[in-house]
Image (cartoon, rainbow, N blue to C red):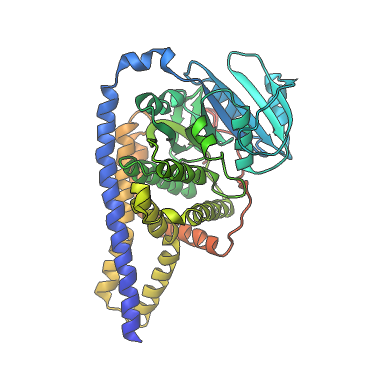
């Protein structure tokens, strides 16, 4: 019995040790890549970027379901983008609140009879409203079919060869489009690009510019801020180097319309439609041996609200984890298949073993080693070393990510906020990280979630706010 417990505990220790090494190495790779990125940006051809004729027109798709509180703020942020030509398409997916009427009234939209070519499948169109301003705003009403179905409608309605997908509670910085489109200008084979997602709950933006970034006071916001930095400035930058990013966040991503149509658009019925689309693109282009690139651009910034209630956060994380599981299960043919290159041999195994399965092993490992120690079946030295490995790697990766953020975005990351985040990066490893594992662990027992999240929206922070967040 003792030998069996000993073997189980060592299995969890080795797993966490390997996980820590991989995460730490990916952070080192990301740090080196970020330095190269900064140098390359300084020497990029000014002639190419300053010529507005080089910029391809873009359609911005905003799927909306019960977004009355934030939809006008989102559209206003989009009207202040520094980009030559783009259109804004709001797809109202059968909202039960006043989302559609709020947009119609605020922008004085008129109903039009507009034919729509069904390039990808979606629910039938109900009505279309437009204006004739410099930046065209299009409101599309349709029956509720889920976020993926709403995005497919947006693709069908869009007029331009590139489209941006973003959430209705997200705000883009004024230079976000010019930054993210650079990947398409640099490499003709680019088919998808992800942007950098930051926590907006305590950030004041005016006309697409950050005018104030308050240090969060709520622990939930602080911990999520650290978590977002760790994800978007570490692992995704590292996968950039091998063209193996499996996720472009639904909050902000740019896609080739042709590539999206090639794979049949977004898959209706899955929870993680953003990851599913990217995995389908990898599979299609690798299988057909077509040159392509899926990138991540760290200085193309989108600000999004994160949950401030524990119940909402729990549902969000379970939903994300269910979506990841669906995408991985639907593409098992890629696992360790050399035909799919770095995606099949590196990215897929990583996401399976160190993202999807991790919550399960995380919880079982803590319980197993904790019980063994309590009953005297585990020596003190082993227990301490396990805790150091388990907690230490997360702290180091978080701290490096915070320092990277300060290095790249020194204008918005103030010193006092940096030091506060570095301090809470230590505390985050003692409770919050384990709580997220518990939330994601629940996804294994409740595999079906709503196609739209139940995120509670609040008005964007203003200068006059007291900053109680």
Give percent across and percent down for residue 51: 39, 12
In depth, the one of 282 and 400 nearer the eye is 282
Q: Is residue 419 visible?
A: no
Instruction: Answer left or right for 403 relative to 250.
Output: left
Quadrant location of the N terminus in the rendered image: bottom left
Q: Quadrant of residue 158?
A: top right
Q: Quadrant of residue 448?
A: bottom right
Q: Is residue 390 above or below residue 266?
A: below
Instruction: Answer left or right for 149 relative to 237.
Output: right
In depth, the one of 395 and 93 nearer the eye is 93
Instruction: Answer left or right for 272 relative to 177.
Output: right
Q: Can you name the residue that lies furthest to the front here?
A: 288
In depth, the one of 422 and 382 nearer the eye is 382
Give percent across and percent down for residue 219: 46, 49
Give percent across and percent down for residue 55: 44, 18
Instruction: Answer left or right for 257 relative to 238.
Output: right
Give percent across and percent down for residue 248: 46, 40
Residue at point 74% right, 40% down? 96
Q: Is residue 231 visible?
A: yes
Q: Quadrant of residue 335?
A: bottom left
Q: Is residue 383 above or below residue 99?
A: below
State how many labels appear.
0
Q: Is residue 327 above or below residue 225?
A: below
């Amino acid at each position: 019995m003792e030998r069996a417990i000993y073997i189980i505990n060592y299995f969890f220790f080795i797993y966490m040790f390997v996980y820590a090494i991989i995460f730490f190495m990916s952070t080192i790779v990301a740090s080196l890549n970020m330095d190269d990125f900064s140098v390359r940006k300084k020497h990029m051809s000014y002639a190419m970027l300053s010529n507005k004729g080089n910029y391809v027109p873009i359609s911005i798709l905003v799927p909306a379901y019960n977004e009355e509180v934030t939809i006008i703020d989102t559209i206003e942020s989009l009207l202040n983008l520094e980009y030559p030509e783009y259109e804004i398409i709001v797809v109202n997916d059968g909202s039960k609140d006043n989302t559609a009427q709020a947009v119609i009234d605020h922008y004085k939209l008129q109903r039009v009879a507009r034919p729509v070519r069904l390039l990808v499948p979606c629910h039938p169109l109900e009505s279309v409203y437009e204006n004739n301003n410099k930046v065209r705003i299009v409101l599309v009403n349709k029956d509720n079919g889920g976020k993926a179905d709403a995005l497919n409608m947006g693709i069908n309605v869009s007029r331009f060869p590139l489209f941006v997908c973003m959430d209705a509670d997200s705000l883009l910085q004024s230079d976000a489009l010019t930054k993210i489109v650079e990947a398409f200008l640099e490499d003709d084979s680019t088919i998808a690009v992800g942007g950098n997602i930051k926590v907006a709950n305590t950030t004041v933006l005016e006309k697409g510019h950050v005018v104030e970034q308050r240090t969060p006071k709520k622990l939930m916001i602080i911990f999520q801020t650290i978590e977002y930095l760790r994800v978007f400035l570490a692992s995704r930058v590292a996968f950039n180097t091998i063209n193996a990013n499996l996720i472009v966040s639904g909050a902000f991503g740019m896609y080739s319309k042709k590539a999206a149509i090639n794979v049949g658009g977004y898959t209706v019925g899955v929870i993680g439609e953003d990851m599913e689309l990217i995995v389908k693109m990898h599979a299609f282009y690798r299988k057909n041996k077509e040159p392509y690139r899926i990138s991540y651009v760290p200085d193309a910034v989108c600000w999004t609200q994160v949950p401030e209630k524990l119940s909402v956060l729990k549902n969000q994380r379970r939903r994300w984890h269910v979506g990841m599981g669906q995408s991985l299960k639907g593409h098992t043919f890629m696992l360790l298949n050399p035909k799919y290159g770095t995606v099949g041999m590196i990215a897929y195994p990583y996401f399976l073993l160190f993202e999807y399965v991790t919550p399960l092993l995380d919880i079982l490992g803590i319980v197993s080693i904790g019980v063994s120690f309590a009953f005297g079946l585990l020596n003190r030295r082993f227990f301490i070393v396990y805790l150091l490995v388990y907690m230490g790697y997360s702290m180091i990766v978080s701290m490096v990510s915070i320092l990277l953020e300060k290095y790249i975005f020194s204008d918005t990351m103030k010193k006092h906020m940096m030091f506060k985040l570095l301090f809470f990066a230590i505390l985050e490893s003692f409770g919050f990280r384990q709580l997220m594992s518990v939330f994601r662990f629940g996804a294994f027992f409740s595999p079906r979630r709503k196609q739209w999240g139940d995120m509670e929206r609040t008005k964007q922070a203003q200068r006059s706010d007291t900053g109680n967040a």
